[in-house]
Amino acid sequence: MADNADHIDGDDNEDVRAQQNLIKIKLKSSEGGIYECGLTAAKMSDLVKNMVESLGTDAVVTTEPIILGNEAVTDAALKKIIEWVEFHWDDPPVDHDFEDEKDRRNEELSHWDKQFIDVDDQALLFDVIAAANYMDIKGLVEVGAKHICSKIRGKSCQEVREMLKITNDFTAEEEDAIHKENAWIYAKD
Amino acid sequence: MDQQLTQRMASLVTTDDGEDEDIQQPKIYAKDSMDRFGDDMFGLILSYLSLEDRFRCECVSKQIQRTVFDSVVDIDLNDQLIRKINKTKTTVTQTLETIVKKCANIETIDCRGMIYIYLLFGLQIFHDNCQYLRNIYCNMPSNRYQLVPKLRPLVTRISGVSAKQSFINYHRLSHLSVTFIDNVFDKNFGLMAKNLLGFEFTFKLRDFDRQLLSACVAENQSLRSAIVWIRSRHYRLCKHLSFNAL
């Protein structure tokens, strides 16, 4: 298969990726749940990709589950992650040109990603982001980060604390001093 | 026996101190609290905030304060920002200094939206405080608006050029946007900008000098993109496209 992959171009390569995604591998959460995922999709995780490549043959990969030991990889989080990679595995590759990178960072999330990441259960949201970070799925970490930042946008410190359940460890005086330094952001243009 | 008891009492007293407890036992955070994340994750997540939102949530917690500015690598300095600062009790210099001290990793300053008078000392403050600063984008309508010599090697993009002027000390200039192509030639038709990656100008239908364009292309073989404005439309010419077509 590797031989073929070496001298094929664009469209054929997509076919290979599609075919490889028909191969199902098993992923095991830190809670013990085992879930199936297409091989190409699962390889969006650099952690899984490296594990699969170090294991070598496809036969081993499809029988033994890959254990994801990090405690953020709960059953619920892993199910969400598999849903995301199964939707995104055939995305065009990311262009790393500087200008595009900046544009991409500023780009809003797609409708699908917005609906996907907008979960009511904040513990699950944080698990998904932490698990995606552990599994090294950069695209999904970005989706989670953009989602949180969009929720922070325009909110006051107190509102942000309440929403994300962050403990305030500043004294009132320290907080006042920061407010004074940053007075310009509250000025109306 | 008594001594042991006193020692035990003493140790009880010290562990009662709230701050020591934090150090001795790892805290268990609620799963739905962002406190569970380490600084790395905070930095990663908060890197998608706008500059204003970063400053607005600086006082949420100490962890946010120390992670929220690390990822600011490019900053836009514009008149809107200056207008806002002018409405506060602090001076522009003071505020720019606080901004720059918090955002120590700035690499690129885009001040194409800033008028000249603030530009100079604004850039001075950033130059003195940002050790990673390596790109300045600015407007330079005419020769009157030259930057001080020590800032010139940092300028990589110049826009808004509407009169002839020299770019000789701008060694790293890579993108240039001028009104007309003759703005980049001196009186003896010597080309003043070479080895550009991007070039933008307006095409004059009436007295367009093809020789100027040829000279420009010849000295800028590395050009990756050229944007030519024809009235209000613009055409992007790529490297592989021949300029002779004009």
Image: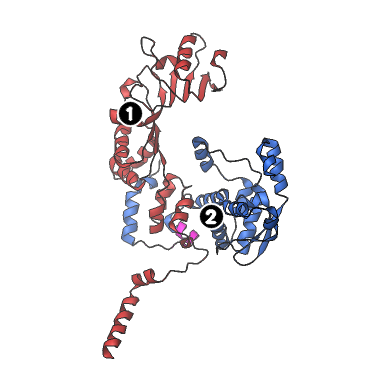
Chain colours: A blue, B red
Amino acid at pointer 1: Arg
- Residue nearer the viewer, A47 or A186: A47
Q: Residue at x 51, y 25 (%)?
A: B225
Which image quadrant is residue A161 in? bottom left
Magenta stretch contains residue A161: yes
Q: Residue at x 33, y 61 (%)?
A: A172
> Could you tell me residue B226's position as x and y percent?
51, 22
Q: Residue at x 47, y 55 (%)?
A: B41
> Could you tell me residue B58's position as x and y percent?
39, 53
Q: Chain of mark 1?
A: B
Q: Chain of mark 2?
A: A
Over which residues does the magenta segment extend? Answer: A159-169
- Residue nearer the viewer, A70 or B203: A70
Q: Which residue is mark 1?
A: B152
- Residue nearer the viewer, B183 or B199: B199
Which image quadrant is residue B113 in? top left
> In screen coordinates, is B229 left or right of B57?
right
Residue A133 has which mark? 2
Q: Residues within 10 Å of mark 2 (few under 14, many from 20)?
A: many
Amino acid at pointer 2: Asn
Magenta stretch contains residue B212: no
- Above or below, B153 relative to A14: above
> Could you tell me residue A32's position as x and y percent?
63, 67
Q: Nearer the viewer, mark 2 or mark 1?
A: 2
> In screen coordinates, is A26 left or right of B7?
right
- Above or below, A146 relative to B121: below
Quarter that holds the N terminus of chain A? top right
Q: Secondary structure at mark 2?
A: helix
